Amino acid sequence: MILQTESPLPDVLADLLGLSGFGVAGEFVAALIAAFIVGNVMLAMTGVAGPWAKRKITAKFTDRIAADRIGPAGIGTIPADALRLLSKELIVPEGADRPAWDIAPLIVAGSAMLGFAVIPMGSGIQLADPEVGLAYVFAVASIASLGMVMAGYASNNKYSMLGALRAVAQNLAYEIPLVVTGVSVVLFTGSLRMSEIVAAQQETLISVGGIAIPSWFAIVNPFAFVLFLTANIAEVGRNPFDIPEAPTEIVAGFQTEYSSVYFVLLYLGEFLHIFLGGAITAVLFLGGAAGPGPESIGFLWFVVKIWAFFLLTQWLRSAAPRLRIDQLIEVGWKGMLELSFLNLVLTAVIVGVVA
């Protein structure tokens, strides 16, 4: 099994590049380089997922061809779509609250990027490892709700405003179960530090026929894993929980009035949050970067896990019908919330008995 390295990536780079001797300035430069590396890796995966992988996966599920005109297997669609969207005119709706309208896309995309700062990705790739890492990642990820509300309100469009209100209602209904279920993992580990949560899952739970089954919390507590996965999918707004956008009902919800680079930022933010949701799930329930083989390939296992989460969201997008807003809220407040607290109590009892 793969173990986490103790030193964050900026410290490793500072020693490797000889920046440690420059004090705070050297540490700052190393942190910028590390953030640049991690940020670009996530952006590259998002660039592949949004314009190309999403279409190809959905086409397989729905028996269609998808993008195949530009480059091998349509891979040239990625730069073509980027050029097409960025070259479009930025149309500002009449009566828009311009400062809020401009800032909203940055908040949606930026909140996801901030979340990756504390995610241990294996092979020594982690920007920071604070003691409150789990609380931090939940907090910054939830900032996206503010961006959606700003986008809906500032667009001066009733459909956009309706999408923003739906986003708030949905996030309130599912964010509490998400956090409460995450806290049940903290009861097992006794820590909010992300690296310690991963380290707690490195031991072998049981060996069956010579096959070692790891102590991943998805195996230890599958009930919590299913709850967290459901709430997580609702948080990233994928079917059957894509109520804030709902193209067949409210055009495109909070992002209806956006075009050009602003639409790119909102679209980018959507897929960044999907990958962040997969990363959090991997850390809390799937052993982080743990997997067969040497520690040096830990990052590859981590990437496989977050792409598996992305594949799940795309399958649901093709297979699961959208819930009505009243049904979605009822499931969140009357089902998920009660089950998440029940899971928390049962986990506390189990931990108390075992301890």
Image: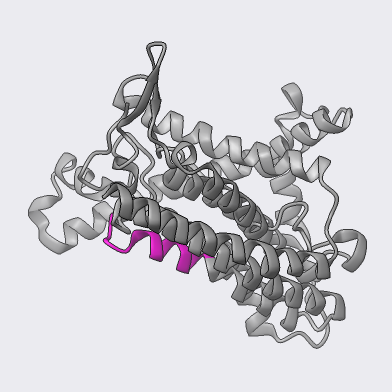
Residue 342 screen position, x and y as percent: 53, 61
Residue 241 screen position, x and y as percent: 75, 58
Q: Observer-nearest residue: 309 or 226?
A: 226
Q: Secondary structure of the magenta portion, mostly?
A: helix
Q: Is residue 213 above or below residue 317?
A: above
Residue 231 screen position, x and y as percent: 62, 57
Question: How many discs appear?
Answer: 0
Q: Magenta span has 237?
A: no
Residue situated furthest front in the rendering: 353
- Does 233 sit left or right of 131 as displayed? right
- Does 180 sit left or right of 199 as displayed? right
Q: Residue at x 56, y 40 (%)?
A: 45
Query: Magenta segment, which residues?
Result: 127-141
Q: Observer-nearest residue: 148 or 30?
A: 148
Q: Quadrant of the N terminus?
A: top left
Q: Observer-nearest residue: 105 or 176?
A: 176
Colour setup of the view = one colour
